[in-house]
Image: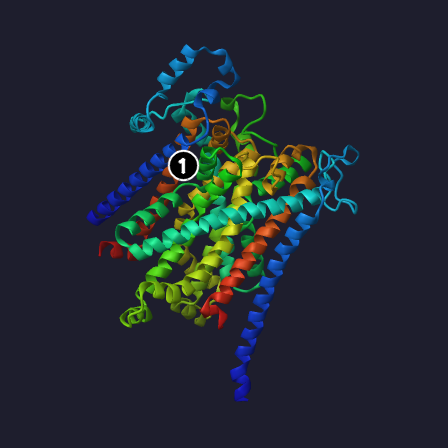
């Protein structure tokens, strides 16, 4: 247990270092942006304000200070949990991210679950019946999807299921004209269906190919040979002996691929105009909302690093072999 | 009898090698043809023609026309060419970065290695797309925004591969022997290390193209990156987004399928070259 605590502490240290480096880097990047914050904030109204008002804004925002000073005050605020105020939503960044993330969370959660299950099953089938027709079809599907842009899959699903067939809504997270608080649970799921389907279809490529490799490895092991020699069929060997061997790597891989899931959700949310964090990121980038953009970068980094951390911890907690290695 | 047994596997491998070389040639031919087609095609197809708006694919217009009457075939081919150019530029920048950092990490070791592997960790633990948006935002969008963003986010995997390769070479017996024989470091680098790294580098570069092209298309689609003055495939697709609800499916489907085909050809080319250059598989 002591070694585990030590291990956990070192991981947490690594996490905080990565987040710190990312925030410094993104602050430096943003300060290079050829964007005048005041013009971005006011737009054409800038022509109407006087010199004094402009000077007031500059000193209020600390734009007259040097970049290192600005960074220190920004970092100090962030450590206190104050990410500043989003310009386009006119709300504190923390509130915007919190609200938007709840919407994105359900999208990513379902996509994560379905792509994991589907990818695992397909990969296991492909690995069990190697070089069969099913294997070839699954492999072709996975390799093709790996080179397919997520936003294009989203568009095709939108054209087919929402526009042509009219089975699913074209956009948003609820019916038009209904306040977000009043949208019923069923309606929510109904509007989630297509974005989730997009991300699930695209997300299975990696997990399928990985599971397939692991299954092939399993069938080359001694205990698989023994089970086959005892007269078990390939499928029963795979189900009763193989699955528990390949389940853990699949779960950890699924946790470690949260970054791609997040990227995918950005694209899917833009196509379906789903009011999640991804859509907010793109809006922030296009309309020059620097506080929100920086907030999202830091938040998404934490999201991904925590995913990796869970993946590592799962390995050490569940797999006794790794734990002893760590202890040594 | 023994002769046939000895020869049989060899014949198979020769056939496979020939097949692999043929696949590579076909892929290269595909790109050359695409590029020449893009250069040869005049601008007639790009002119607006309101008599022939929104036509579905037909014999006259194999890919159909868009809402301004422009020929989608011309636009797609030209868009693919632009996407290839930007993808190549970005992938090359990224590969050079990966080469420098990967080799530096392995050769200098110690603190340099720690810093560079730390950088790899940092880049790998941010969602690619968010980082791409941030960087192209910081660069003010445009072509340079896309190229820099893709270059700065895609170097990690190749850098890791090259670092591992140099690490392994450093401890190889024949390199130690070469040093004892009094060869200079430069001579060893040129005659022993470079021939090992170059194929890895080239293949890594080719396998970077698909990612670079897809991500630059994604960035353009989201509205960062290129503008409609540079109609790459990403721009074509993002323009067709506005036409989706009108049921003009070909505007989205056809350029997308072409993009996937192109990316897949790059993938096949890279993987076949890897198969050919890897001594373990090429002698199978």
Q: Do we see residue A207 in this rendering?
A: yes
Front position in the image: B145 or A107: B145
State the image coordinates of residue A276 (x, y, percent, origin top left): 49, 31
State the image coordinates of residue A156 (x, y, percent, origin top left): 62, 41
Residue with the mark numbered 1: A300
State the image coordinates of residue A146 (x, y, percent, origin top left): 53, 50
With A113 as the anchor, is A157 left or right in this view? right
State the image coordinates of residue A1 (x, y, percent, origin top left): 21, 48
Colour scheme employed for the rendering of this structure: rainbow
Q: Chain of mark 1?
A: A
With A198 as the anchor, is A222 left or right in this view? left
Front position in the image: A98 or A130: A98
In the displayed image of the protein, which residue is found farthest to the left?
A2
> Number of labelled discs?
1
Residue at 44%, 44% in the rendered image: B153
Q: Quadrant of the N terminus of chain B?
A: bottom right
Front position in the image: A87 or A34: A34
Residue at 56%, 78% in the rendered image: B11
SS at circle 1: helix
Q: Residues within 10 Å of mark 1 (few under 14, many from 20)?
A: many
Q: Do we see residue A250 in this rendering?
A: no
Front position in the image: B6 or A6: B6
């Amino acid at each position: 247990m002591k070694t585990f605590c030590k291990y956990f502490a070192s991981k947490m240290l690594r996490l905080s270092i990565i987040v710190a480096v990312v925030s410094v880097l993104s602050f430096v990047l943003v300060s290079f942006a050829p964007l005048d914050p005041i013009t971005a904030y006011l737009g054409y109204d800038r022509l109407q304000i006087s010199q004094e008002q402009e000077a007031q804004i500059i000193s209020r925002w600390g734009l007259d200070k040097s970049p290192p000073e600005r960074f220190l005050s920004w970092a100090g605020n962030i450590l206190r949990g104050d990410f500043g105020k989003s310009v386009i939503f006119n709300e504190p960044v923390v509130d915007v991210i919190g609200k938007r993330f709840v919407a994105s969370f359900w999208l990513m959660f379902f996509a994560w679950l379905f792509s994991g299950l589907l990818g695992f099953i397909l990969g296991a089938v492909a690995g069990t019946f190697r070089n069969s027709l099913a294997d070839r079809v699954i492999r072709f599907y996975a390799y093709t999807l790996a080179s397919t842009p997520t936003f294009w899959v989203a568009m095709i699903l939108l054209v087919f299921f929402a526009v042509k067939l009219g089975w699913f809504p074209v956009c948003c997270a609820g019916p038009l004209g209904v306040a977000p608080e009043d949208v019923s649970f069923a309606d929510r799921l109904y509007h989630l269906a297509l974005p989730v389907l997009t991300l699930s279809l695209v997300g299975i490529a990696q997990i399928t190919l990985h599971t397939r490799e692991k299954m092939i490895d399993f069938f080359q092991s001694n205990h698989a040979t023994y089970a086959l020699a005892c007269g078990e069929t390939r499928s029963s060997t795979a189900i009763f002996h193989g699955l528990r061997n390949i389940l853990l790597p699949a779960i950890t891989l699924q946790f470690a691929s949260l970054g791609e899931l997040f990227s995918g959700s950005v694209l899917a949310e833009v196509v379906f105009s789903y009011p999640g964090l991804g859509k907010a990121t793109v809006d922030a980038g296009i309309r020059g909302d620097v506080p929100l953009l920086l907030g999202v970068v830091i938040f998404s980094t934490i999201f991904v690093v925590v995913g990796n951390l869970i993946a590592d911890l799962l390995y050490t907690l569940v797999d006794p072999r790794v734990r002893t290695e760590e202890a040594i | 009898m023994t002769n046939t047994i000895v020869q049989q596997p060899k014949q198979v491998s020769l056939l496979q090698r020939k097949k692999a070389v043929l696949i590579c040639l076909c892929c290269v031919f595909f790109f050359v043809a695409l590029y020449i087609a893009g250069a040869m095609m005049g601008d007639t197809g790009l002119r607006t023609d309101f008599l022939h708006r929104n036509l579905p694919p037909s014999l006259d217009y194999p890919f159909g026309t868009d809402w301004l009457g422009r020929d989608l075939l011309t636009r797609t081919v030209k868009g693919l060419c632009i996407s290839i150019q930007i993808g190549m530029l970005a992938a090359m920048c990224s590969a050079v970065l990966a080469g420098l950092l990967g080799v530096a990490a392995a050769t200098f070791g110690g603190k340099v290695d720690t810093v560079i592997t730390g950088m790899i960790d940092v880049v790998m633990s941010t969602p690619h797309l968010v980082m791409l948006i941030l960087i192209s935002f910081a660069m003010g969008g445009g072509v340079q925004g896309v190229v820099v963003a893709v270059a700065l986010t895609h170097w990690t995997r190749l850098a890791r591969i090259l670092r591992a390769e140099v690490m392994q070479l450093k401890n190889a017996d024949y390199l130690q022997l070469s040093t004892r024989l009094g060869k200079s470091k430069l001579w060893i680098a040129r005659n022993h290390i470079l021939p090992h790294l170059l194929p890895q580098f080239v293949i890594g570069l080719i396998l970077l193209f698909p990612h670079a092209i897809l991500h630059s298309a994604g960035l353009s689609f989201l509205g960062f990156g290129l503008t409609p003055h540079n109609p790459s495939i990403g721009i074509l697709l993002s323009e067709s987004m506005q036409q989706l609800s009108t049921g003009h499916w070909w505007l989205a489907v056809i350029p997308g399928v072409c993009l996937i085909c192109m990316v897949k050809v790059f993938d096949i080319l890279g993987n076949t070259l890897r198969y050919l250059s890897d001594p373990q598989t090429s002698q199978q």
